[in-house]
Amino acid sequence: MVKGPPHNDLDVARRILDGDESAFSALVARHHRAMIGVARVFIKDFASAEEVVQDTWIAFLDALPRFEGRASLRTFLFRILSNRAKTRAIRDSKQVPFSSVDDTGDFVEAARFDATGHWIRQPRPWEWDTPEALTSNRQLVAWFEEALKLLPERQRAVVLLHDVEELDSPAICEMLELTEGNQRVLLHRARAAIRTFVDDKTRGRP
Amino acid sequence: MTCQQLTRLVGDYVEGRMSTLEQLRFQFHLGLCEPCRVYLRQLEQTRQSLGHLPEEQPPAQVRDELLHRFRAWKATPR
């Protein structure tokens, strides 16, 4: 995934403003997964979340002449998205209070440890070792994608913004209305859950 | 420190948010426990892998709609 420095962002912005369809399509593809993830923190209904993402792209295009490269283009885009998603949720009065189910409980389920707190089934090194090896393995990619889909909304959005989009924590907290501590817990829970899911799959557990 | 306790403290450890004593306990456990070293390594691999996931194209219908709107936006004088 290309995550360029700011001068690259300005270049992308300029190309889009010049009407370059392929630059626009590439940007859409690059951020689609995380955009849906963020929208769904505020909007439960998938079709409505998709609609907000689409509207965000048009708002992004309209705002693009004002992009000066002070923040990254990604931050610029996700700020627009989170604002629109929040507004939409308020308008539809469908804001659902979050249960605390996604930021409490164990990082690794207690059932995976014996009475003395040791692993029942000890982690063994994965056969694939590098992120590059992951991208060439479609099965692994599918497991990661499935693991992401199974996460509670806020965990998914945090890990997508942090590890996939590489936004910084203060920006993520602002977009998702989280405290810094809460954001950290959600991030580490998400990584632990994905790791456990992928590990179970690689070891042939259902 | 047990393996289970270690899994709860990993976040603080990787972010350097531990007291010196906690950190020593954590590292002491790691030094003796191969499975926990593997666990820690896998969490790091998970983090890195997420950054390398292939892009996810929106559904064709959404893509077409977006391109349509992009063209309309392009045609609007600014």
Image (cartoon, grey):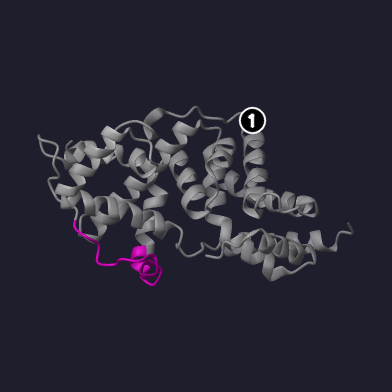
**Would you say residue A109 is visible in this rendering?**
no
Residue A79 horizontal/vertical position (percent): 65, 43
Q: Is residue A18 left or right of residue B32?
A: right
Dot 1: chain letter: A
Q: Is residue B63 left or right of residue A127?
A: right
Q: Residues within 10 Å of mark 1 (few under 14, many from 20)?
A: few
Q: Say which amino acid is labelled 1.
A: Ile
Residue A76 horizontal/vertical position (percent): 67, 49
Residue that lies at the very extreme toward the left in this rendered image: A115
Observer-nearest residue: A49 or A73?
A73
Residue A115, image quadrant: top left
* Tag 1 secondary structure: helix
Observer-nearest residue: A64 or A9?
A9
Residue A168 horizontal/vertical position (percent): 54, 45
Assess whether residue A132 is covered by the magenta stretch: yes
What's drawn in magenta, residue-wise? Answer: A124-140
**Would you say residue A62 is visible in this rendering?**
yes
Residue A200 horizontal/vertical position (percent): 24, 54
Residue at 42% x, 28% y: name it: A99
Q: Residue beneath label 1, please?
A: A90
Residue at 39% x, 54% y: name it: B47
Does residue A16 lie above or below A55 as drawn?
A: below
Q: Is residue B18 left or right of residue B64?
A: left
Residue at 26% x, 58% y: name it: A201
Observer-nearest residue: B70 or B4?
B4
Give the position of the C terminus of chain A as an image quadrant. Answer: bottom left
